[in-house]
Image (cartoon, coloured by chain):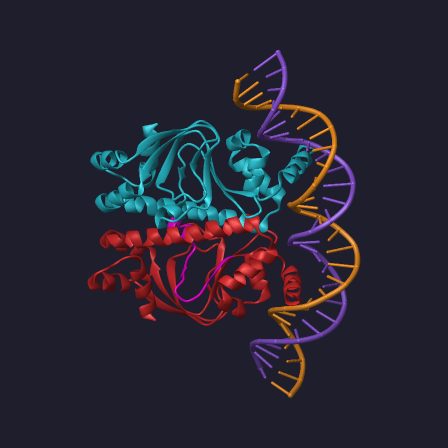
Chain colours: A cyan, B red, C purple, D orange
Amino acid sequence: MKELLIQNILNHITLSKKELDSFFSLFNQKEVHKKNFLLREGEICKFEGFVIKGLFRVYHIDSNGFEQVLYFAQESWWITDIDSFTNEKPSQLYIQALEDSEVLLISKKDKEFAYNNIPKIEKLFRVMTQKTHIALQRRMIDNLSKTADQRYMDFIEKYPNLFQQLTNVQIAAYLGISHEFLSKIRRKIASK
Amino acid sequence: MKELLIQNILNHITLSKKELDSFFSLFNQKEVHKKNFLLREGEICKFEGFVIKGLFRVYHIDSNGFEQVLYFAQESWWITDIDSFTNEKPSQLYIQALEDSEVLLISKKDKEFAYNNIPKIEKLFRVMTQKTHIALQRRMIDNLSKTADQRYMDFIEKYPNLFQQLTNVQIAAYLGISHEFLSKIRRKIASK
DNA sequence: ACAAAACATTGAACAAGTTCAATAAATGAA
DNA sequence: TTCATTTATTGAACTTGTTCAATGTTTTGT
């Protein structure tokens, strides 16, 4: 459990044992049962979270009631609404556990404390934000250039395990298509 | 000119005059004439740039030869291929001047120097990367949920000046539609 | 083990967006 | 100014994806 976060941190920066302990002590562990929410639209996101067990979906509901999934977060993924968290404004997102899950949470105040007292933490989050930004840029290009068929096959290849755990409705909401159409894509692929 | 960058920095963090001068001295000014490239696919992006005059498009060409525009960068925007720059790998992007333009460039080495010697610079780029990430998340959701009509109207509203300078082909490549279809959208809107 | 709910599939009619080819309009270089 | 190039518009046929409604399948709670 604990090791997952430490490993994740040390993948990006090097910290002394003391710094690591100091930073680690700012996190609180929380269980979130299947179908429960860590964040709902309208709430101000008070945490940044690191998934140590389970699976979450981070999604938006548009004015027509349709869901768009920003990402699924498995073990070792970070979850937050970065806009709501950093700017302390109401969130437009939902964060829901899809399985019984566990997260390590850090509050804004404690994160500020870390920024101010452990300078390398600033680098940690700069580098992590850069990485997620690069991934999102890649996804943006794919969404602009690829058909739903290709995006579905890319998804299976990229997240072979996730794809098993998720419903078609959830995957369709990530790909930006209706679940009925996804069903037809699956049939077409299966028939080959 | 110079003031634009300083203003941009001070919008995010506070620096002493000495720190500011030290950081600023790491930048070199460069002119880029209309239609010339600051970066081409396959090159390793050696710079991070701040636009002080003109307009750039940052785009990708997919395997079918279609262009996808990641963003347009006007005065006070930063331009780089963050993936290529940070990981020193060949870029998948083109960065082209759409007007005679001027940029302030910083090299990777000098940026590392700034990170190591002016700790607040780490914060500057963390905060800026967060902001661009938030904007891209928003765009991702819009692309998943809105029709091309809506996205076009949003674009006009968000970038009223840009929209005047750009061709329909360029705007279509940003919206993720064919320029012919954009033409039909324009007709439809005009007829109201 | 059962009933209710959630999930997946399918077809038919429709809407959104592409492609291709033709034409007109605007821009730019000499 | 002129000629060539780029840019914009349009229509027709086509492809991709949606919507709705019906049906079957799987999960889940008790």
Q: Relative to residue B164, is residue A129 depicted above or below?
A: above
Residue B115 is situated, as x and y percent measured from the top left of the image, at 27, 52
Residue D27 is situated, as x and y percent measured from the top left of the image, at 56, 24
Q: Residue at x 44, y 27 (%)?
A: A100
B56 vs A114, left or right, is: right
Q: Residue at x 35, y 41 (%)?
A: A46
C21 vs B108, left or right, is: right
Front residue (pair A46, A69) = A46
Q: For residue B85: magenta?
A: yes
A101 vs A149, left or right, is: left
Give the magenta-colored segment's residue range: B70-88
Q: Residue at x 30, y 41 (%)?
A: A13
Q: Identify the image quadrant of the C terminus of chain A.
A: top right
Q: Residue at x 31, y 69 (%)?
A: B3
Could you tell me how many numbered marks the image carries?
0
Residue D3 is situated, as x and y percent measured from the top left of the image, at 67, 80
Residue A55 is situated, as x and y percent measured from the top left of the image, at 46, 32
